[in-house]
Amino acid sequence: MESAIKIEGLTKEYLNKTTGKMVRAVDDLHLEVYKGEIFGFLGPNGAGKTTTIKMLLGLIFPTQGDAWIFGKPIGDVGVKKIIAYLPESPYFYEYLTGRQVLDFYARLFGIPASERKKKVDALLEMVGLSRDGDKTLRNYSKGMLQRIGVAQALINDPELLFLDEPTSGLDPMARIEIRDLIIRLKQQGKTVFLSSHQLLEVELICDRVSILNRGKLLKAGKLDELLPSGRVEIVAENVDDGVAEKIRALGGQVQRQDGRVIVHQPDDASVNRVVDIIRGANGVIRSLIPQRRTLEELFVSTIEEVEKK
């Protein structure tokens, strides 16, 4: 697959003025993002996510290591024409209207006057602000400001978008709209590099994810590989305590709820044996649902494992 981003040994050190020691915000990072995918870049606060993004954008320089965007080294002027960045808290002049903000950035990119109005109107429609385009930004809600930020990031029709917490502060409906917009961008062939703490949303839309902590890459891969199915939930009725004990002996977790028994088996291998035990004791199986580990569970366990060391 063609690389949109390739990172080899990227490192960034800062001088801690309090201690006088060098601190590594990003530590020997190796990573590859493929063209046309939505890539989740995850980690707790202070993990080095924003520092990495700023290096890729050419806003700060790495201490060592290399990175390329569509085969060109980071910092290349030509790259800046085909990428876009939406920070977590974008700032715009509040006395401008949404339409004026987009027109301003369109002028910066040298978009001709004959095309600007059509492009601005299309972007306002895309992010759901066509009715509010002539309101000043001081009258925009947090969600509306985030949407105008997304529209601004798309003004140059970028091939690669860096989105840092794009749904921060949004209500549920607005989050769904932004999530759907990101999926549409992928369908248009664009690559999205998404940094977010909204792990459920990341799990819903990302093709691959990585987990960073203290500047080090801990995990990276496809969600299906990182979150394999294994647990199975069995809901049954007419299960007595003796049967429940036999199930526990096979490693299952048994809970009683509203006259039913809910069994969580840790692996597929023992499921058939549990079903046989329940049926052999005249129990009734109401449902059998495979479950997989959530991204949140993977994230927490990965970070906790490193913190214990």
Image (spheres, helix red, strand yellow):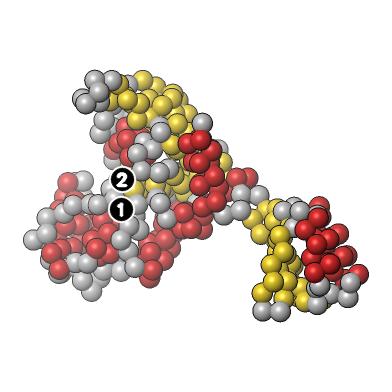
**How crowded is the residue under tag 2: few (<14 C-alpha within 10 Å), some, or many (20+)?**
many
Q: In the rendered image of this protein, does residue 308 appear above or below residue 15?
A: below
Residue beneath disc 2: 84
The image quarter containing residue 95 is: bottom left
Residue beneath disc 1: 154
Q: Secondary structure at mark 1?
A: loop
Give residue 178's position: percent from left, percent from top: 37, 62
Q: Nearer the viewer, residue 184 or 138?
A: 138
Most extreme residue toward the left is 95
Residue at 48% across / 36% down in the picture? 307
Say what amino acid the circle numbered 2 marks.
Ala
Residue at 86% across / 59% down in the picture? 273
- Horizontal side of 181 relative to 107 (left or right) equals right
Residue 121 appears in view: no
Q: In the rendered image of this protein, does residue 54 appear above or below residue 173?
A: above
Residue 197 appears in view: yes
Q: Nearer the viewer, residue 173 or 131?
A: 173
- Horizontal side of 118 relative to 216 (left or right) equals left
Give residue 53's position: percent from left, percent from top: 34, 38
Say what amino acid the circle numbered 1 marks.
Leu
Give residue 12's position: percent from left, percent from top: 33, 26
Mark earlier in primary sequence (2, 1): 2
Give residue 44's position: percent from left, percent from top: 40, 44
Residue at 56% across / 41% down in the picture? 221
Most extreme residue toward the bottom is 259
Marks 2 and 1 close (CB-CB < 8 Å): yes
Q: In the rendered image of this protein, does residue 253 appear above or below residue 235?
A: above
**How crowded is the residue under tag 1: few (<14 C-alpha within 10 Å), some, or many (20+)?**
many
Q: Secondary structure at mark 2?
A: strand
